[in-house]
Image (tube, rainbow, N blue to C red):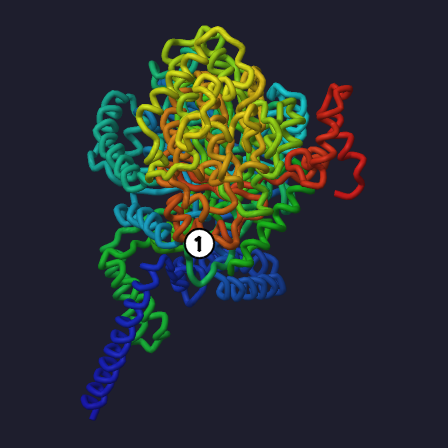
Amino acid sequence: MFVASKQADEQKKLIIEQEVQKRQFQKIEELKIDMQKGVNPFFKVLFDGGNRLFGFPETFIYSSIFILFVTIVLSVILFQAYEPVLIVAIVVVLVALGFKKDYRLYQRMERAMKFKKPFLFKGVKNKAFMSIFSMKPSKEMANDIRLNPNREDRLVSAANSYLANNYECFLDDGVILTNNYSLLGTIKLGGIDFLTTSKKDLIELHASIYSVFRNFVTPEFKFYFHTVKKKIVIDETNRDYSLAFSNDFMRAYNEKQKRESFYDISFFLTIEQDLLDTLNEPVMNKKHFADNNFEEFQRIIRAKLENFKDRIELIEELLSKYHPTRLKEYTKDGVIYSKQCEFYNFLVGMNEAPFICNRKDLYLKEKMHGGVKEVYFANKHGKILNDDLSEKYFSAIEISEYAPKSQSDLFDKINALDSEFIFMHAYSPKNSQVLKDKLAFTSRRIIISGGSKEQGMTLGCLSELVGNGDITLGSYGNSLVLFADSFEKMKQSVKECVSSLNAKGFLANAATFSMENYFFAKHCSFITLPFIFDVTSNNFADFIAMRAMSFSGNQENNAWGNSVMTLKSEINSPFYLNFHMPTDFGSASAGHTLILGSTGSGKTVFMSMTLNAMGQFAHHFPANVSKDKQKLTMVYMDKDYGAYGNIVAMGGEYVKIELGTDTGLNPFAWAACVQKSNATMEQKQTAISVVKELVKNLATKSDEKDENGNSTTFSLADSNTLAAAVTNLITGDMNLDYPITQLINAFGKDHNDPNGLVARLAPFCKSTNGEFQWLFDNKATDRLDFSKTIIGVDGSSFLDNNDVSPFICFYLFARIQEAMDGRRFVLDIDEAWKYLGDPKVAYFVRDMLKTARKRNAIVRLATQSITDLLACPIADTIREQCPTKIFLRNDGGNLSDYQRLANVTEKEFEIITKGLDRKILYKQDGSPSVIASFNLRGIPKEYLKILSTDTVFVKEIDKIIQNHSIIDKYQALRQMYQQIKEY
């Protein structure tokens, strides 16, 4: 009967185990599907860790027994008093029950109490204190290096060691040996533009982080990942924008930006390899480090160095898409500095300073205190007093509960905080095979013994995932320390941070008892972390997801020098706007730009604003640029007078071409001036060719055209006759008043031939009272003057008239191309599809786009309707020749249109149609797209009115222009808008 009962129990256990395995298999498959989607569970069963007796912390049990024993000896045996024993016993029981319920509370208190005496009270920690802290006799302690160049000069005490003999040893460029007998190397990584990258691409990119930690499954490696967000000041107030209005407007904008909170967010991965766990030679122990055989020590260490460097190179390869950069040495003014030590020094108190090293001695004699003089700790906040007597406040954030699952966006809200911080994540992987066996054994034991089946199944799943290499496990802890310049700002930052974390499913609060632990743990240390638990490698990868902005442009050393202006990204980092592709100062770089935005999106304001900002490029030229080319010309092809006020305020000439009114354009007079100038023979011939082509277009206006816009009926003889007459008129020494009339006079007065040259040109001739006599048959002074800095041309009147628009546009663009002579040249074409509607004009501009880069010119094409621009004959050329695309909001856009013209992704299109309010989406070939704000709040309203002219003010501006007694048109405009109460 006993045997039967035993067999029944075994059968029951077998059935339970089989059922659990079945459910476990299903759960593993579900977990793998979630992991492929970038969703990784937290295995809560790993959080409580630690050795226990009867469910209580083991060390607490031993300590309590010792305390009770001492109490009994002192109270009962010596003083015959039983009350103290009872009181102590009650206290121990109550504390024990609390620790049993929340082991992590005990863990945090235990780790906090491990500090030496200075940590047992709140007060001041100075440099000497920090050296005492770092000399804890544990190889897991802070990674300050204590190898003295004179080996016989031993450490006398921790304090005077820090003050007198704090040395660091470089084994190699970018590799440091610590006093804990481990190697350190640090990589700086770039972020991923998560706001503009599709979810699928983000998962693929994030998978590369997963792969890093699956390749490190041995405990001799530790990883410290730092997210550093530091406040920076954008001060561009000293820039000279050449023109009065440009200087006033940009000064107001730059002063506003200087007051804004800008932050630089950076990511650093530090790899530590513990040599004491990997060196098997008998001499490689702590005793060896203390003897005088330093040469042997160096030989063995260097033998291990190569393996460490290989591992770092592997990590760099796996994270290549994050643009890794090793922190190494660099030379400036003949002095060698270490970026690696500068970073470790920065972690102390967020103070940036150069760190000089001496490669000849291999040892550095700088003190690793980060420019911090003293540190004050209070209840929830602390204060740093720096060597320069400046002050900074700080507070640590303690995370006691975690969300059920981790994803790469877990800490996005932290990265977006309006606060400086250092967020350190520490991870130490465990041996996978040993861990797998232990997990499997524990899982079976829990299930068979009748324990929690859910807990047993979770451990079983972990065992399988670890065994299959899907994940690894490791110890994890973090330290989040916020910094601020004032106490009030510090309190506000803590409030926002805690609120952001709790909104993501965490349980966070300002650290109190453990604040010192967190403050010092942010360097590179496990021992000071109050709370350490096990997580999967995927959890850790989610914690350190580098989601920020990988492309911010260059503030200096661009093709024309400084950036155009600084905008603000979505994560409060600066974005340095440039139209040119990244290159060195003075290099010929493509800068053509396509600007797309619907009505009311702010397109005109953006174009006018950046036009003013480009006034700075009238200064500072490379040394190899000739004096006559050291100038800037900006031409704005306008429509509906949107830039009218801006051009006038900038001191430019605004050319209004109206139907039926003499344009003031005389192509013959211009070409004749070119012949008499110092232009090259090629330039002279080009000018004549342009006029020939223009007059030919006039003569063939009514002819049937082929697909290229050429006449199918104009005879070769007439073409040659016309060309000869044009050449003679331009090169002859004669008055060029009314040149079309002079051409007709040269051909004779026979008007009977309907296809003759006289009949063809008559509509454009004043003597025949032609319909279009006002176009080019004018006085011998051409109105266009490209010697000025800024010129505007309005096409509102003629662009919709197909009878004259092609001729005017052809001549305008020909003149503009002639002015692109090597000087810095900016051509803006608003509603470009209107100007490029005629095939001949479009093909002319196509050639201009292809050659303008070599002429040191950029062309910016803008439109409200992308559909209309796609219908342009050179739409494909625009897409190819415009490496920079800038998008403003367009709620009614079509994805296929944006993809065809600008190679926009679905994610970018979603942003264009929904996520841009006074913002731009900047997209440049070879770089990630960026969302940046051009928020002009706080700028005087009269400036904003000048940037974009409402049609109701056109006549008022006309009056200012026509009033010759008004010398300063800009001030007159400003006063006009200031007098208007309602904007």
Q: Which quadrant of the view contains residue 902?
A: top left
Q: Quick check: 799 above or below 623? A: below
Q: x and y percent of residue 667 in the render? A: 49, 20
Give the residue displayed 59% in from the left and 25% down from the top.
236
Q: In which quarter of the image is the C terminus?
A: top right
User: Is residue 76 shown left or right of residue 548?
Assistant: right
Q: x and y percent of residue 189 in the render? A: 39, 37
Which residue is labeled 1 in the image?
894
What crowding class fits label 1: few (fewer than 14 Cα within 10 Å), some (14-19), or many (20 or more)? few
Foreground pick, 15 / 773: 773
Q: x and y percent of residue 899 in the render? A: 38, 48
Residue most toward the bottom?
A: 1
Inspect this view and state whether residue 840 appears.
yes
Inspect this view and state whether residue 274 appears.
no
Q: Which quadrant of the view contains residue 682?
A: top left
Q: x and y percent of residue 290 in the render? A: 32, 27
Amino acid on which disc 1 is placed: Asn
User: Is residue 60 shown left or right of residue 176?
Assistant: right
Find numbered disc 1 in the image and state the secondary structure of the residue it sits on.
loop
Foreground pick, 661 / 25: 661
Q: Quadrant of the N terminus?
A: bottom left
Looking at the rendered structure, the number of numbered marks drawn on it comes to 1
Give the residue displayed 53% in from the left and 41% down from the top.
800
Give the residue displayed 40% in from the left and 25% down from the top.
693
Q: Which quadrant of the view contains residue 854?
A: top left
Give the residue displayed 31% in from the left and 68% down from the top.
30
